[in-house]
């Protein structure tokens, strides 16, 4: 084996239970993008076992994959393209988000044989998906023949809990729900909160929260608090084998562009993962954990490999395993560290781990 992403399903269970308790509401587990890189089907099953009442994905294809795997729980797909095969989605009992009159009409047209389950999405300030001015134009005819099971919106700044926009979005959501209820949607469930709001804004939990990053044990933003402070357990450990270990003298340039040179006689390790596997090429001040210490990247990350400075005293051998990131409990780098090291966020680090890296499931990583 060259590299693997080991996913601790018991950590995901812990996180789902913890978030559900914190919300005091139903929980939709967001499993889009291959469950944030953790593996769609296994994570979905685990989240349901731990008490999630619903699954959420971006794409219809993701929802279809879950149905094909035998999952019968409610699934919401919220990024359904115009012209999609709505009819098959309705037959598969996939809940569809609609954020425009055009989308509603397409779903209506596909809903002749079986009534579609629809969640209306309202744009309360994210300015991405959802009804904006068209919201006030929705008439009974636009929703005739559809089962409106949900009304939802999405926060833009929930990771900055003190920002006024959070209050404004919640107020706007409540107000618009009230106007729409005149069309008879009083049974629809209301959902607004992502992970950040679930962790910090209890008043926005409403009927259901939609938690993504936090079910994987990662904090939505390190400035809000760490995983540990939120009692979340990071579920993934990314590890790789050292392909080669070699002694090099001081002043040896390393890698493409000779962007860095060794500053002393040292031992270098070649790690068999690269940017094709999701290791960010621009990462600075990240590296791996081996034999109880950190070994920083030296030189540029290549497509399939990168080099770390193991230090002159290192006893490492080729074939030894290194931890690229983990939960940090031993001092290893975390997904948060890799995010910071590459001008990005933990979300991007875990979701971009490439398809060449097998996902392994284990209850015992540490
Ligand atoms: C991705 C997504 C979420 C989950 O966001 P997290 O920050 O990962 O909790 C919730 N709702 C919608 C609409 C999303 O696109």
Image (cartoon, rainbow, N blue to C red):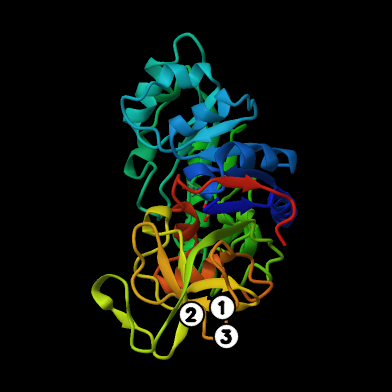
User: Are discs 3 and 1 less than 8 Å apart at CB?
Assistant: no
The percent coordinates of residue 328 (x first, y second) are 63, 71
Dot 2 lies on which element? strand
Q: Does any atom of ligand 1 lie closer than 8 Å to the CB of label 1?
A: no
Q: Residues within 10 Å of mark 1 (few under 14, many from 20)?
A: many
| Mark 2, residue position | 267
Between the C-alphas of marks 2 and 1, the distance is: 13 Å
Q: Nearer the viewer, residue 179 or 309?
A: 309
Looking at marks 3 and 2 on the same chain, the residue that comes earlier in the sequence is marked by 2
Q: Which of pointers 3 and 1 lies earlier in the amino acid sequence?
A: 1
96 displayed left or right of 20: left
Name the residue rendered at 53%, 19% in the picture: 92
**Residue receiving disc 1:** 294
Q: Image quarter for residue 88?
A: top left
Q: CA distance from mark 3 to mark 1?
A: 13 Å
Estimate the spatial distance between the alpha carbons at disc 3 and disc 2, rounded to whole Å.
8 Å
Q: Residue furthest left?
A: 257
User: In percent of the image, x 60 and y 72: which residue is there?
Assistant: 290
Residue 116 percent across, percent down from the top left: 50, 21
Q: Nearer the viewer, mark 2 or mark 1?
A: 2
User: In this view of the protein, can residue 183 be seen by the observer?
Assistant: no
* Residue at disc 1, secondary structure: strand
Q: Secondary structure at mark 3?
A: loop
Residue 296 image point, x, y percent:
48, 78
- Residue drawn where x is 54% and y is 45% of the image: 358
Q: Residue sitting at 48 percent across and 51 percent down?
A: 154
Mark 2 crowdedness (10 Å alpha carbons): few <14, some 14-19, many ≥20:
many
The residue pinned by badge 3 equals 313
| Residue nearest the observer in this picture, 243 or 185 | 243
Asked whether 116 or 87 is in front, the reply is 87
Figure check: 109 above or below 187 = above
Which of the two labelled residues, at mark 2 and mark 1, occupies the earlier sequence position? 2
């Amino acid at each position: 084996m060259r590299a693997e992403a080991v996913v601790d399903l018991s950590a995901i269970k812990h996180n789902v239970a913890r978030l559900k308790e914190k919300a005091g509401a139903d929980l939709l587990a967001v499993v889009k993008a291959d469950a944030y890189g953790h593996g769609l089907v296994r994570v979905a099953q685990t989240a349901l076992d731990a008490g999630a009442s619903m699954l959420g994905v971006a794409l219809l294809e993701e929802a279809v994959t879950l149905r094909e795997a035998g999952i019968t729980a409610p699934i919401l797909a919220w990024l359904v393209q115009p012209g999609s095969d709505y009819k098959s989605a309705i037959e598969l009992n996939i809940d569809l988000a609609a954020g425009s009159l055009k989308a509603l009409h397409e779903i209506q047209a596909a809903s002749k044989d079986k009534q579609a389950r629809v969640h209306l999405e309202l744009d309360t300030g994210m300015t991405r998906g959802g009804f904006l001015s068209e919201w006030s134009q929705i008439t009974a005819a636009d929703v005739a023949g559809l089962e409106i099971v949900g009304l939802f919106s999405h926060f833009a700044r929930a990771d900055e809990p003190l920002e006024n926009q959070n209050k404004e979005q919640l107020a706007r959501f409540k107000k618009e729900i009230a106007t729409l209820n005149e069309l008879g949607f009083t049974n629809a469930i209301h959902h607004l909160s992502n992970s950040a709001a679930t962790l910090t804004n209890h008043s926005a939990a409403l009927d259901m929260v939609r938690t993504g990053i936090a079910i994987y044990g990662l904090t939505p933003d390190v400035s809000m608090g760490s995983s540990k402070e939120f009692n979340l357990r990071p579920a993934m450990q990314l590890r790789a084998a050292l392909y080669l270990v070699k002694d090099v003298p001081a002043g040896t340039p390393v890698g493409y562009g000779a962007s860095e040179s060794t500053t002393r006689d040292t031992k270098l390790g070649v790690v068999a993962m690269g940017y094709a596997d999701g290791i960010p090429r621009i990462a600075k001040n990240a590296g791996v954990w081996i034999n109880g210490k950190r070994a920083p990247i030296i030189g540029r990350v290549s497509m399939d490999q990168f080099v770390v400075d193991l230090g002159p005293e290192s006893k490492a051998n080729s074939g030894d395993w290194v931890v690229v990131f983990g939960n940090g409990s031993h001092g290893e780098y975390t997904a948060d560290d890799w995010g910071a090291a590459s001008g990005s966020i933990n979300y991007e680090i875990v979701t971009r781990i490439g398809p060449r890296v097998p996902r392994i499931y284990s209850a015992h990583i540490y």
